[in-house]
């Protein structure tokens, strides 16, 4: 018999030092994410909030201006408010989806 079965077992089983290194790195990432998790969450909520509020307010302001200049049967303010809200929600959704995708890829590489 040859030494080939022993070599394949060594390739499959990580060394003790490798296992400890992986666990230590995971623990450090967890501690870091817990300490900065609250601030990251608040920052994310703020960013998502502003990404919805800014287009909504801008649409409302432009709508008020158009209503004052060009009177019509339909309200520009309401129309542009809704349009700004939709655009803001889509913007926030795309940003959160991108962040989620990046976090999943990062976790996939860590395992």
Image (cartoon, rainbow, N blue to C red):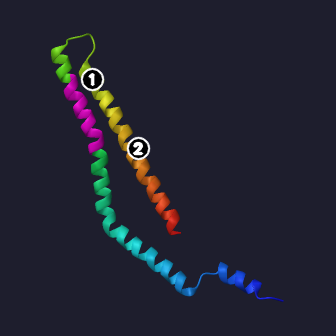
Residue 44 in the image: state x and y as whole percent. Answer: 32, 53
Per the image, the residue denoted by label 1 is: 78
**Element type at marker 1?**
helix
Q: Is residue 64 above or below residue 17?
A: above
Could you tell me residue 35's position as x and y percent? 32, 69
Q: Nearer the viewer, residue 50 or 38?
A: 50
Stretch in magenta: 50-63
Position in image of residue 20 (x %, y %): 50, 83
In the picture of the structure, the residue carrying the numbered disc 2 is 94
Which residue appears at 40% of the width and 76% of the height? 28
Q: Nearer the viewer, mark 2 or mark 1?
A: 2
**In which image quadrant can residue 91 be found?**
top left
Q: Residue at 25% x, 29% y: name it.
A: 59
Q: Residues within 10 Å of mark 1 (few under 14, many from 20)?
A: some
Q: Nearer the viewer, residue 111 or 36?
A: 111
Quarter location, residue 85:
top left
In the image, 88 versus 14, the foreground residue is 14
Quarter-of-image position of residue 25:
bottom left
Q: Residue at x 30, y 51 (%)?
A: 45
Is residue 101 positioned above or below 31 on the image? Answer: above
Secondary structure mostly taken by the magenta-highlighted segment of the chain: helix
Label 2 to label 1: alpha-carbon separation: 24 Å
Horizontal side of 83 relative to 64 (left or right) equals: right
Residue at 49% over, 59% down? 105
Give the camera-side residue of 98 and 8. Answer: 8
How many badges with numbers are in the image? Answer: 2
Q: Report if residue 96 lies within the magenta region.
A: no
89 vs 36: above or below: above
Q: Position of residue 10 (x, y in %)?
A: 67, 84
Does the magenta-highlighted stretch encompass residue 53? yes
């Amino acid at each position: 018999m040859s030494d080939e079965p022993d070599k394949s077992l060594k390739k499959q089983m990580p060394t003790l030092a490798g296992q400890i290194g992986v666990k230590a790195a995971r623990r450090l990432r967890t501690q870091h994410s817990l300490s900065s998790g609250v601030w990251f969450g608040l920052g994310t909520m703020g960013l998502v909030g502003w990404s919805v509020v800014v287009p909504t307010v801008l649409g409302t302001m432009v709508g008020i201006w158009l209503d004052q200049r060009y009177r019509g049967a339909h309200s520009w303010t309401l129309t542009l408010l809704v349009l700004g809200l939709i655009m803001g929600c889509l913007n926030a959704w795309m940003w959160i989806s991108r962040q989620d995708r990046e976090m999943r890829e990062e976790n996939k590489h860590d395992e």
